[in-house]
Image (cartoon, rainbow, N blue to C red):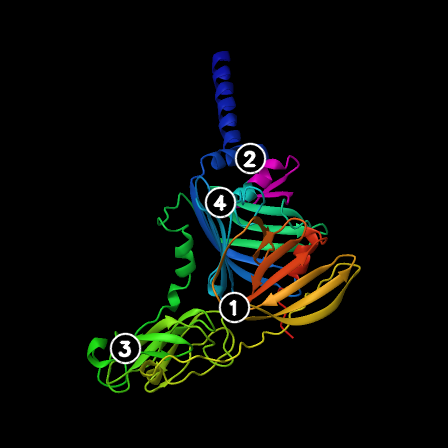
Amino acid sequence: MRRFTWVVALVMVCLSLVVSGCGKKDAGSVVKELDGVMSKLQSYHGKGQMTLRTGQDPQEYDVEVSFQAPSFYRISLTNAKKDITQIVLRNDDGVFVLTPHLNKSFRFQSDWPENQGQVYLYQSLVQSILMDNERHFTSDEKAYVFDVVANYQNGSLARQKVWLDKRNYAPQHVEVSDANSNVMVIVKFDQFEFGTKFEKDQFDMQRNMTGWNLKTLPTMMQGDSKTGEKSGATDSKAGTGTAGGKSTATGNGMGTGTNGTATGQGAGSDAKGEAAGTSKGNAAGTATGDSKGATAPGSSSDSSKTSSASGNQGTAAEAGSDKGTAANGAQAAATGAKKDTSKQQSFGIIEPRYMPSGVKKQDVTELKLGEDQAVMLRYSGKYNYTLMESRPQVQTVSILPGDILDLGFTLGVVTGDAKKTLTWTYDGIEFRLSTGDLPETEMIKVAQAVQGEIGK
């Protein structure tokens, strides 16, 4: 009897150990397993949405992140409403900040992002959990939830809550709050997978500069009468013309009767683009080339969009937020190159909502930066700084000593020592904030204060 009782007791102890081992995990066990995940991390890919509440109205951004061990990164931030994308790359050649729709890139030799956290990077989220010994831990049905200190460049962000999938510790949701517990940043991941296999040029700079908007490549369309495909060498003539600048017509297209149509692409003033128009007979010739002037009065280089030219009357490519009409595409392909003297349209003055205490705006000056129109706002008082605004029209590739500054809605570039310049783009406009005494935290606030503003 005693032996039976002893056996029963032993079985009960074993069962209790098994049950306790299968029970809820505590913070310590989850943190230990997270550390193991980090040590074996080889690659990941995630997509989601980021909501910023730092301005007057919430701003929505699509976020895509890619990582390949040991140190390749690709981050894509897209303004959901304006369809404007900025890409950050890290590869063997350095760190790049790319603004493809402006044909602009910056290159650094930097250890980013190891020297600063990013709310959409898995490493930043896990490190904030591992480093905070006073972390708060809870769980719900599907996720482990950590409330930890936020470690970001923006000093106004104090804490963050991170939801991790119970199955594999993938991030599901992040909320970053200020010192008053107001949620300022929200990131929601729609998908996140570990062990992703990438194409070999996923982190290549040129591929990301030219391949970011493949959806806007021209597509050939059928006409409204007889259909058929003919070589441009038969029925279309090659020549040069001005459909928004200097372009060369190549007679390779879909000919579909006397009223065939062709589609083309314009990137606004001084950006690379394509214009299209019908040429002789029933084949539609596509005109391609480098635009060296404004596509049409009222157009800008805010973005590259597809438009069409039909029959003998062409419509200019829609570029940016304004529309213009160019000369007939067929005539442009038949005549010689002409110089477009259209003036770049003013984009208005964007004044930040925020000024540091003890600072006043002094004046506003219009000026030229090369071929670009620009305005300069000057502020003085407790701090002194200038804010330059322009809409760049030509490709710029800069190799600079500097670093990346996270502005939340975009990533800025900081250069200089005694006098610093913070450069960033928003809604197709390039901003340069230059100062000798404005603290970095104040620079971030000024930069964030142009978000959502409209030019006056």
Q: Mark 3 — residue?
A: 238
Give me the disc on residue 454: none
Mark 1 vs mark 4, foreground winner is: 1
310 above or below 106?
Answer: below
* Structural distance between the alpha carbons of marks 1 and 3: 36 Å
Task: Tell me which amino acid carries mark 3.
Answer: Ala
The range drawn in magenta is: 127-150
Q: Of the two numbered discs 1 and 3 on the same chain, state the one appearing first in sequence.
A: 1
Badge 4: few (under 14), some or many (20 or more) residues near its Cα, within 10 Å? many
Badge 2: few (under 14), some or many (20 or more) residues near its Cα, within 10 Å? some
* Structural distance between the alpha carbons of marks 1 and 2: 40 Å
Q: Of the two numbered discs 1 and 4 on the same chain, state the one appearing first in sequence.
A: 1
Q: Mark 2 — residue?
A: 31
* Structural distance between the alpha carbons of marks 1 and 4: 29 Å
Give me the disc on residue 170: 4
- Residue 134 seen in the figure: yes
* Structural distance between the alpha carbons of marks 4 and 2: 13 Å
Task: Tell me which amino acid carries mark 1.
Answer: Lys
* Residue occupying image coordinates x 47% and y 80%: 296
- At mark 1, the secondary structure is loop
Q: Of the two numbered discs 1 and 2 on the same chain, state the one appearing first in sequence.
A: 2
Badge 1: few (under 14), some or many (20 or more) residues near its Cα, within 10 Å? some
Mark 1 vs mark 3, foreground winner is: 3
Q: Of the two numbered discs 4 and 2 on the same chain, state the one appearing first in sequence.
A: 2
Residue 41: % across, % down: 45, 38
Residue 292: % across, % down: 44, 73
Q: Mark 1 — residue?
A: 82
Residue 440: % across, % down: 68, 51
